[in-house]
Amino acid sequence: MMTRLTQLFLRTLRETPADADVASHQLLVRAGYIRRAAPGIYTWLPLGLKVLRKVEAIVREEMEAIGGQEVHFPALLPAEPYRATNRWEEYGPNLFRLQDRRENDYLLAPTHEEMFTLAVKDMYSSYKDLPATIFQIQTKYRDEARPRAGLIRGREFVMKDSYSFDIDDEGLDAAYSRHRVAYEKMFTRLGLDYVICEAMSGAMGGSKSEEFLFPTAIGEDTFVRSPGGYTANAEAIQTPTPEDVDFSDVPAPAQIHTPGAKTIATLVDGLNAEAAREQGWSAADTLKHVVLKVTHPTEGESLLVVGLPGDRDVDLKRVEAALVPAEVEPASEDDFKAYPELVPGFIGTGHIGPQGRKDEDGNSVITYLMDARVARGSAWATGGDEGGYHTINNVFGRDFDVDGRIEAAEIREGDPAPDGSGPLELARGIEIGHIFQLGRKYAKALGLSVLDENGKARVVTMGSYGVGISRIVAALAEEYHDEHGLTWPIQVAPAHIHIVATGKDPAIFEAATQLAEDLDDAQFDVIYDDRPKVSAGVKFADAELLGAPNILVVGRGLAEGTVELRNRVTGEKRELDIAEASQLITDELTAQLLDADA
Amino acid sequence: MMTRLTQLFLRTLRETPADADVASHQLLVRAGYIRRAAPGIYTWLPLGLKVLRKVEAIVREEMEAIGGQEVHFPALLPAEPYRATNRWEEYGPNLFRLQDRRENDYLLAPTHEEMFTLAVKDMYSSYKDLPATIFQIQTKYRDEARPRAGLIRGREFVMKDSYSFDIDDEGLDAAYSRHRVAYEKMFTRLGLDYVICEAMSGAMGGSKSEEFLFPTAIGEDTFVRSPGGYTANAEAIQTPTPEDVDFSDVPAPAQIHTPGAKTIATLVDGLNAEAAREQGWSAADTLKHVVLKVTHPTEGESLLVVGLPGDRDVDLKRVEAALVPAEVEPASEDDFKAYPELVPGFIGTGHIGPQGRKDEDGNSVITYLMDARVARGSAWATGGDEGGYHTINNVFGRDFDVDGRIEAAEIREGDPAPDGSGPLELARGIEIGHIFQLGRKYAKALGLSVLDENGKARVVTMGSYGVGISRIVAALAEEYHDEHGLTWPIQVAPAHIHIVATGKDPAIFEAATQLAEDLDDAQFDVIYDDRPKVSAGVKFADAELLGAPNILVVGRGLAEGTVELRNRVTGEKRELDIAEASQLITDELTAQLLDADA
């Protein structure tokens, strides 16, 4: 296909848009690929749409290669199926909800487990119909609290979601493995690095899940890897429970005066300076109490105190992952006012969890959860529950207890891998794929069973598999750019070649037009800069910004019978005889495309 | 592409689904092309999606052929641009509205004039950037009061919408003509009959518009044609104003007793039987007063009395078209109670319009509009404004007046064409395309102007052009089916050929598999019925139901070295030598595809 710049709906920008904070977002807007319509909602301009469609096509091919059947479900869905699985409530404010003119509840679907389950229930009834893998490439909606980074975290976005249906666990394992392999292939074909990480299942439910992360410093997800090959999303790390500590030598707890020590740093200073110095207390020996407000979509708001070593911060994303589907935020001043037993800066163990108030059902009014890495029997300096005082020798399990455990502390570079495979290295990434073994949760909730060989009804087991199609476009732009603009891999580039005609000589435009038409006829995607009154400098800058992998310059050299083929990434130049140019470029582009697909 | 029935997500139904009232809906559900997810909201199953994509591809090609640039706008849009053009309010209950978590107003777009206008404003600034034609193929939403007939009137549907931007009227005319030609080509390529009709612009606004209707008895739109070539949607017919009638011979109005004559029929009987017989009154000489409730999205509810000849019914669709964006329905008993001066069955001219009550601004409380075909000066029998009485010799313009004119009466077979081109013939159709000259309405409302050659700002003039992609799938199914199932034209069929392997002989399945693979390799779309334990009868019935244009039977004949190629529509059969079958079928399918594209 040939796209002439005199016709293309395009305007490139020299300045970086004010609201774009990452390179991919900046460049996709500057190069005229996308435009913002509302927070987290983008319009695909012609070049962006071409890239999106090429990404879709590669994903589709790999899904069809594992027997996936493509369908297309509505985005606007009735509430009932999502009520049956509780997700109507559990999604909380992340779900776009609306009513139709008859005041029936509808939603804009963030994912389609319910509808696929019901479709299979509607159409299939026997084990002979299984296994089945069904997928769609479709627009999804999620009312993100903080849409960011352009296409990376949007509120309207394109996903490939597929679902597998099997009669037994072996079938599910096989479907899961097939998807895992298909994902490896598709990301490789797309030219995207990826790391496969253990992941939390989150709002999906289900037993096992892995994420495909594209490693990048601007990623929202933190993941870890160990020398022994362990990889996991930081949210998913399960810290092994430490062995109980012998506390028989620990003296009874004592209150010490620590005026002004409202923070861990000053506390440690205070402890060192005063009563605790001789005991060698350090920040790691203080037990920090972090007060959080938990908002559960169905159970409402509650207060949570997390206990963790004083030298660690709470990782709110880990806490949220542990408390799905609740949202978690630091407690506000108003929250503290509502619980006067919590003395800011000096929260001890005396009035929280089992030591605190109880509601009418006998549950703690202030839930107290201990970080997974804190051993029972360990002794701590904690707040003294009194302004200006701390308690030392406060032993977990002897002097106080908790309501439960939680994975709350941040993971740090060098922490041991939970499987013993060595110290963890931390990195950041963008989730580009996620595969889940859902098991029978949705099938049970919605009544999907089939008859087995013996005519007995068996609940079907399911997998759910997602790929962030629009997010991949951003990941590609993040990976493939330089200081001049985008540098698309040929298999996803909006054009295989960008032809620049420079100067005013009509012969130049004639030759360039002929080459553009030849390459179009040869089924290549061509951008042809046929703008008559634009300077060569502007044309080259635009070509580099748009980022087609090959740039063909038809200009002064034509008088000597040559044109110049440039590699966008390496800058390497080749002079081609005009008589052979069409054939040589065809050979070159064919070779590049074959190479990309190898 | 090859689709094996052992893998395809499909279940055909022998029974007609209870909620499907037209053939296309019944067959598309029975043959497993679509499933209903909610009223007017459908899931595309694999075969349906294949047809949809082929329709899209043809529409896309014709749009690209006239220089259209494809983009993709969000479906979820902020309210502001639609407030700027008043459509946020004017769409009334037809618009799906929602709020995000910050309580900002959003809508699910029914059409994108505002967004395209803003995009061009954002990116273009000079006459040199124009003309521009931009299009998308995208999912749209409309909260229809009465979704019906499957895909024909849905609430979530796929449209191609394009927009032209020009600096002057000549440019708009040219863009409009290019679209008109492109539409003729695409509908012809799709194998769909069409009639181009004058149309109302409706909620779009703008000056000129034409509809492409697919003629079918189940259509929702009524259109007319005359021997002289006039065609129009019945809603759009502008009845010529009749000349004034000389009423100098008409006696003064008189009240006559017409007990029990609450309907026109009994009134005419009554009139004939009593005082009016000698004057030759007929139903056509009575002036019927129809009371309607008008609900305007911004101005609220009001009562309207329409006057029209007693032998004509009111066509509510014509009235609504005349009163866009209001909705119109017959007045209810409660409405009558609120206006006691209206005596049901005997509504006269004494208390309505200029003769009735006035509001504080001096406007009629009960609006009285006269149908366009009633001449001033004509004399009528009307209700007497008193139970059991009618008024005769009631002259329009002498004895009573109205607030205005309206196109309200039904159009009838044989009515004269407004352009004098002969008697009208009536037919029904489905709107598959609509082209509008919007003019400068949206550009003005949203501030889209560009600088002309002289550096002066000029408001851009626009056109808007729609094609109902998902509706076309239904229209095709409506046109192409017989008593056994669907009979797709090859260019939109989900498969070019449907291969049926019958019996149990493994040699048959091997031969059929080989042929399926050969044809798949030759880039044909193949459905291969490889189900091992399904009877030949069921397989043939399914093949006919699914409706691929060619059916290849690999069965008993194989022992004699032959397979059988059947034409789905004509039933014509050809025996092919198995050795040559692959080549002969390739030739045949290639010929059919070329023929369809000619």
Image: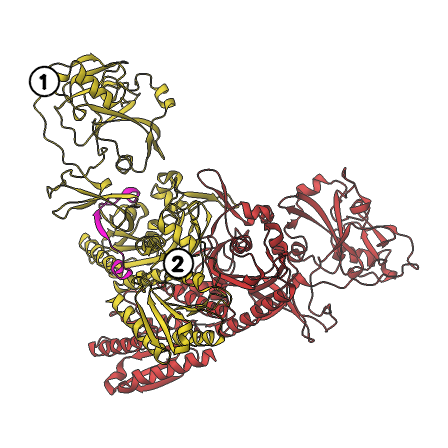
Chain colours: A red, B yellow
1 vs 2, front mark? 2
Q: How far across and how far down the image is residue B510, in percent?
A: 46, 76
Q: Which residue is drawn at 23% across and 25% down?
A: B288
Looking at the image, residue A428 sits to the left or right of residue A282; the answer is: left
Q: Are marks 1 and 2 on the same chain?
A: yes
Q: Residue under circle 1? A: B250
Helix, strand or loop at mark 1: loop
Which residues make up the magenta segment?
B186-207
The kind of residue on which mark 1 rests is: Val
> In this rendering, is residue A486 above or below B144?
below
Label 1 crowd bin: few (<14), some (14–19), many (20+), radius 10 Å: some
Q: Position of residue A213 (x, y in %)?
A: 57, 67
- Check disc 2 and report the residue beneath it: B545
Q: Is mark 2 on a helix, strand or loop?
A: helix
Q: Residue B465 carries which label?
A: none
| Magenta segment includes A207 | no
